[in-house]
Amino acid sequence: MKSTALANANIALVKYWGKRDEKLILPQNSNVSVTLSELSTITTVEFSDDYDEDIFILDDKVTSGKDKERVLSQLDMVREIAKSSQKAKVVSKNNFPTAAGLASSASGSAALVMAATDAIGLNLDKKDLSILARRGSGSSCRSIYGGFVEWNKGEAGDGTDSYAKKIESYDYWPELRVVVGVVTLSEKEVKSRSGMKQTVETCPFYDGWLKSVDKDILDVKEAFKNKDFSLLGKTSEHNALKMHALMIATVPSIIYWNPSTIRIMNAVKLWRENGLESYFTIDAGPQVKLLCLEKDEQEIISRLKAVDGVIDVISCKLGRDAKIIYEHLF
Ligand code: DP6
């Protein structure tokens, strides 16, 4: 009754921002991402009669509050499918700072559902794992897969058609890199969940976002198909800026950037003007992720490290599917 799973984080190139159903976690718009090789969560789950209550230990700390509630509600979903009432111990480790905008909820929820369903003896396919991961955190439905992934928003009220699918495998475009610039280690002030709710409720531009997203998805898919890096980068950068424009124009305003974030954004534009091609994307936090090709990777890493306020740089290839592993955390 014990299983361990490893899932990688992902970064959206066309963002998920806004829900049409808060409880089922159904998005307003479809979105696409790439899975990141170097950012991962490992989670071990054990169901046993020995446990009187569920225990969740994240990065060596016994967790309570909202983080624990999320894990418990996903365990309940798994127990309901398996018709079990056994309690569980869950131990999870991220190899990167939790909740600072590096998509820990995505890899965390994907690893959790994969380990929990396996531990309890369910043999779910990837589609059902993606749906279950989505119920914990929307973007995590994409972390079930490696490579280039699309989460189709779906139409059904019950969410049965809202899950991720792989478009291209991790090795389709081996030259592609995502270089992460870490500019803070602290947790973000406004979680994506409340930030996107506030945006849907108060941002006057939200309709414009919804009208423009499908074209971005078509462009990014086209870019992937033709390995057209410029189209991929331009579309991704513009999409991220549109999302941040929504956040800024929400009431009260949400600004996720810090001074280093802006320094990197300006630097990337300047590098591009001088012939070094790279594009940025930013989630609901201050960290910046740069898209580039292998030939420019080392130059981008050293320039990024030299930007004032950059604490760490992590260069990723496209990561693989989430998987069961055989080294348990306890
Ligand atoms: C900006 O998936 O963390 O990273 O579904 O409420 O858990 P919940 O939100 P979450 O939001 C991710 C928002 C984003 C864009 C993206 O990953 O697509």
Image (tube, rainbow, N blue to C red):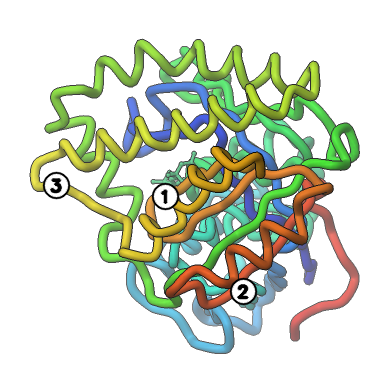
Q: Of marks 3 and 2, which one's residue comes earlier in the chain?
A: 2
How packed is label 1: few (under 14 Cα within 10 Å), some, or many (20 or more)?
A: few
* Discs 3/1, front: 1
As drawn, is 29 to the left or to the right of 273? left
x and y, in percent, of residue 80 in the image: 57, 48
Q: Of marks 3 and 1, which one's residue comes earlier in the chain?
A: 3
x and y, in percent, of residue 99 in the image: 45, 66
The kind of secondary structure element at disc 3 is loop
**Is 268 in front, or is 105?**
268
Disc number placed over residue 90 in the picture, else none:
2
Disc number placed over residue 3 in the picture, else none:
none
Q: Residue at x 46, y 48 (%)?
A: 282
User: Which residue matches tag 3?
Assistant: 253
Which quadrant of the view contains residue 149? Answer: top right
User: Which residue matches tag 1?
Assistant: 266
As drawn, is 67 to the left or to the right of 180? left
x and y, in percent, of residue 299 in the image: 72, 59
Q: Residue at x 85, y 34 (%)?
A: 173
Mark 3 in CB contact with mark 2 (< 8 angstroms):
no
